[in-house]
Amino acid sequence: MRLVDDAGMTYPTTSSLRPAPPAARPSSLATCGAPGGTWRMVLAMALSGTIGLLVVESGLPVLWVVWLRCLLGGLGLAAWLLWSGTWTRPSRREALWLLLGAAALIANWLCLFRAYAYSGIAIATVVYHVQPFVLLLLAAVLQGAPLPLARLPWLVLALVGVGLSSGLLEQAATGSAQGAWQGMVLALLAASLYAVATLTTQQLSRIAPAQIAMLQMLAGALALLPGVWALRGQAVFSPQAWGAVAVLGLVHTAWMYTLMYTAFQRLPAQAIAGLSFIYPVVALLVDVLWFGARPQLSQWLGMALILGALWAYRRSARPA
C-alpha cells in the first residue's frame, strides 16, 4: 500500500518521501509556512481529542498505556520506513535534538495521562491548553519569533472558551473541584513539555517526520521498560484493552504523529498555537457522544467561543 492510503498523506511516490541532500534542504525556519501543514494539524488535533477516551477505556495503568503506545507506534512506523526505504542518518546535532524531543514527549504523556486520573479529562484539558501560550513564549525566546500581539486576543478568547467548555467553573462553584490541583500541576507541566517537543521537531527539517516519530517512540519504549516490568502484575489485558492500545499505538501515534510532525515542520509557531484549540472541542464532543455527558449552556458557549476565535485567528493571518 502507498502512503496516501495508509496515512492520508499526499505524497504520490516513495521517492518523493526521501529527504533532499542537505545542501538543498531549507532551514527549519524556512520550511515553516510550506503548504499542506494546516490540514495535517487540524486532523492531528481532532485525533488528539479522542486520546483520553482510549486511555480510560483501556483500563490499564498509565505507565503501561504509554509504553504500549510507544512500542506499537514505533514498530508501526519502523515497518513503514522499512517498506518505503525512507531513512536519513541523523547527524550528532540532530541525534541530540531527537533525544531531547523524545524525553519531552514521553514525559508529556506520563504527566497528562496521570492528570486525567487526578482531575478528570475535562479539567486536565483546560490547563493543558495553556500550551499555545507556552509555545509562543518559547519560540520568541529561543528562536526570536515575533509574538503575534495583534492576534493574541483571539488566543485568549479561545482559552476562555476552553475554560467554559470544561465545566470547571461549575465544579468550582459546587466545591467538587477540590483536590484537583495535583492534576492541574501535572497538566501544566505536560503543556510545557509539549511546547519543547514541538520546537525540537522544527530543528529536524532534514529528517522525515515518520522517522522522527519512530526514533522517539522506540527510545521511549526502551526508557520505560524497567518501570513497566515492575508493574507487570497490575496490567490486566482484556480484548477491550488490547483494542484500545492498538488504536492508540497505530492510529493515534504512528499516523497522528507523522501528520503532526509534518505540520510542525511546515507551520510557524503562531499557526500551531491557534490550531491546537481544536483538541478541546473534540474532547468535549467525545464526552457528550461517548460518555453521555450533558453540557451546561456555558459549555456550549465555550465551544462556540473556541470555534469563533479559531476562525478569527485564521482570518487575521490572511493578507489583506
Image (cartoon, rainbow, N blue to C red):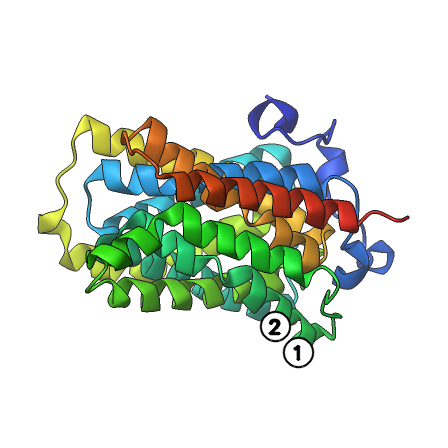
Percent x, y of residue 72:
38, 40
Q: Is residue 65 left or right of residue 78?
A: left
Percent x, y of residue 67:
31, 51
Q: Residue furthest right?
A: 320
Q: Is residue 127 left or right of residue 120?
A: right
Residue sitting at 21 percent across and 55 percent down?
174
Residue sitting at 57 percent across and 36 percent down?
43
For the residue pair 132 and 160, the one nearer the viewer reads as 160
Crowd band around label 1 with a 10 angstrom C-alpha radius: few (<14), some (14–19), many (20+) = few
Residue sitting at 35 percent across and 27 percent down?
289
The kind of secondary structure element at disc 2 is helix
Percent x, y of residue 84:
63, 34
Residue sitting at 77 percent across and 50 percent down?
316
Identify the mark at residue 138; answer none if there is no mark.
2
The reply to whether residue 249 is visible in this rendering is: no
Q: Is residue 17 left or right of residue 129?
A: right
Look at the numbered discs 2 and 1 and tell me whether their residues touch, using CB distance below 8 Å. yes
Q: Quadrant of the N terminus?
A: top right
Q: Residue furthest bottom?
A: 141
Crowd band around label 2 with a 10 angstrom C-alpha radius: few (<14), some (14–19), many (20+) = some
For the residue pair 255 and 270, the one nearer the viewer reads as 270
The reply to whether residue 188 is visible in this rendering is: yes
How far apart, in angstroms, are the residues tagged by discs 2 and 1?
5 Å
The kind of secondary structure element at disc 1 is helix
250 vs 179: above or below: above
User: Label 1: which residue?
Assistant: 141
